[in-house]
Image (tube, rainbow, N blue to C red):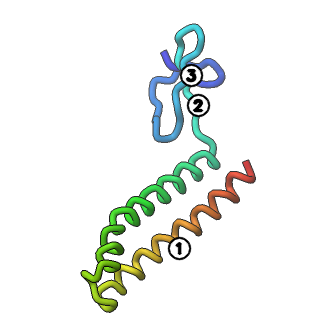
Amino acid sequence: MILDKDGNIITNYDLDKGYLEITQDGQYNYTEFTKNELDIMSIEYQIRNLKELLDNSDYKAIKYLEGYYTDEEYETIRVTRQSYRNQINRLESELSQIKSRS
């Protein structure tokens, strides 16, 4: 049985919008995420994805340093990687502001 914060039975819940906690008596309580929590999770997800994209292109930077790419060939890769870093920095700043309001 799943209960909300007021003790009402919940039959329809969305784990993308909340979480379940098990009480000491074995019951489940469903709590919806706050707007701040949802914003934080969304930004953290975006940061993780951008860092993964950056990590996945590390080998291209190494290949450039080893001479496998010309400056011209590497330029689009460099611009893309810098764009990822700029987005990460912007999101981390936004995340810091949101967390400071919590």
Farthest right residue? 101
Q: Is residue 47 left or right of residue 64?
A: right
N-terminal of the pair, mark 1 or mark 2, is 2
Q: Report the amino acid beneath label 1.
A: Asn
Name the residue carrying label 3. 29
Q: Residues within 10 Å of mark 3 (few under 14, many from 20)?
A: many
Please say if 20 is above or below 49.
above
Label 1: element kind: helix
Name the residue carrying label 2. 31
The residue drawn where x is 33% and y is 90% is 71
Q: Nearer the viewer, residue 31 or 102?
A: 102
N-terminal of the pair, mark 3 or mark 1, is 3
Q: Is residue 74 left or right of residue 25?
A: left
Contact between marks 1 and 2 (CB within 8 A): the answer is no
Q: CA distance from mark 1 to mark 2?
A: 35 Å
On residue 86, which mark appears?
1
Q: Quadrant of residue 67?
A: bottom left
Please say if 89 is above or below 5.
below
Please say if 27 is above or below 99.
above
Q: Residues within 10 Å of mark 1 (few under 14, many from 20)?
A: few
Contact between marks 2 and 3 (CB within 8 A): the answer is yes
The residue drawn where x is 65% and y is 22% is 6
